Amino acid sequence: MHSISYERARDVAHAIELGSTPGSKFIGGGTNLLDLYKSGVERPVRLIDVSRIALNGIERLPDGGVRIGAMASNTQAANHPLVRTPYRVLSEAILNGASAQLRNMATVGGNLLQRTRCYYFTDPAFKQCNKREPGSGCAALDGFNRIHAILGASDACIATNPSDMAVALVALDAGVRLAGPEGERTLPVAEFHRLPGDEPQFDSVIRQGELIMAIDLPPSAFAARSHYLKVRDRASYAFALVSVAVALDLQDGAVRDLRLVLGGVAHKPWRALEAEDVLRGQALGEEVIKRAAAAAVAGAQPRQHNAFKVELAQRAIVRALHSAGGIA
Ligand code: SF4
């Protein structure tokens, strides 16, 4: 029997103090961690309940941006008037994630920390998984890798990040505020998750004892003309095979600047910088959109069962740009 202790943190300082011990894990909504605990994938020795800490506010920042507290539920964040229309791509991404019941429980901070849904990771009956057991190998490399990465993978791991919300946050140049034993720091969400390299056991750069405090959305010239498109096997409660977050700053029909980010294709939200370069300064039209879509996946390295994602990603990019750009 695996024994586990439970403590409720009074405030942020208390949470950091309790969470700094190796083997401790913070728990907010618990919608991913408890599943992984029950299946034996996660084995914390101490759960630190941070759900009662007052970090669930959503407020306007002095610079005109918006701060979303890490303990705000996914539902609160998606439907808040400061988010729903002004940061449309974020609201759409969150509402495309999970089920309504899960969105009511899951927190914004926890959304960023959810773990891959690679079949070989979530089922300990499979012994080869470098993410679960470093050095054990990767069963997905020559296994059923239909949902796996086509960009940025390594020979150690080809898993994808499952978060819809994170993809939209990268498109919005959002920041994540962290507090830990060494103080506070703010990182771009684009730098929060990492590629697998030789250490796929680490999904992000968060350190032991660090607590996500909030997400900061900057005032954005992109946000108003933005869209999240998710392609999945069924209409709800499914993870993205491919998703696209696009945010456009258009002037006189030309793209002054943009963000184009893919989900479901890599170990982290994948910013398609080459595609952005193709589109920047151009009038949005069929030819340039298709060229951008091709540029986005030029470096793809598909596996046996996921080559379809290369074509699917391009089609999703074309459709998302049409929607965000108001092209019929
Ligand atoms: Fe594990 Fe990553 Fe391989 Fe999946 S892809 S089996 S998570 S190492």
Image (spheres, rainbow, N blue to C red):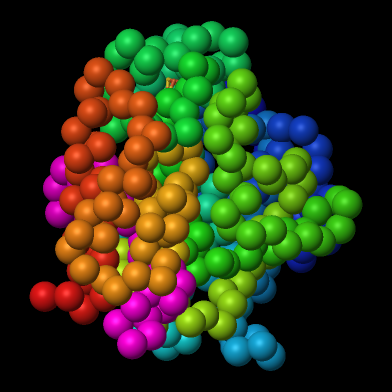
Q: Quadrant for residue 10, please give it.
A: bottom right
Q: What is the residue that sits farthest to the right in this orientation?
A: 182
Horizontal side of residue 113 vs 239, given as left or right: right
Q: Is residue 254 above or below residue 62?
A: above
What residue appears at the point 25 percent right and 28 percent down from the top-left corner? 306
Residue at image coords 58%, 26%: 197
121 sits left or right of 20 in the view: left
Q: Is residue 75 left or right of residue 7?
A: left
Look at 47% across and 53% down and name the residue there.
273
Question: Which of the two residues, 186 or 279, is positioned nearer the viewer here?
Answer: 279
Residue 107 appears in the figure: no
| Picture mark count | 0
Q: Is residue 246 magenta?
A: yes
Give x and y (percent) for residue 99.
28, 57
* Residue placed furthest toward the left: 328
In the rendered view, would you say 215 is above or below 126?
below
Q: Nearer the viewer, residue 90 or 7?
A: 90
Quadrant of the rendering where the N terminus is positioned: top right
- Residue 174 at x, y = what percent? 57, 67
Q: Which segment is the magenta one?
A: 232-258
Point out the image quarter for the C terminus. Answer: bottom left
Whole-percent x and y of residue 145? Answer: 29, 23
Residue 267 percent location from the top left of the image? 47, 37
Which quarter holds ligand 1?
top left
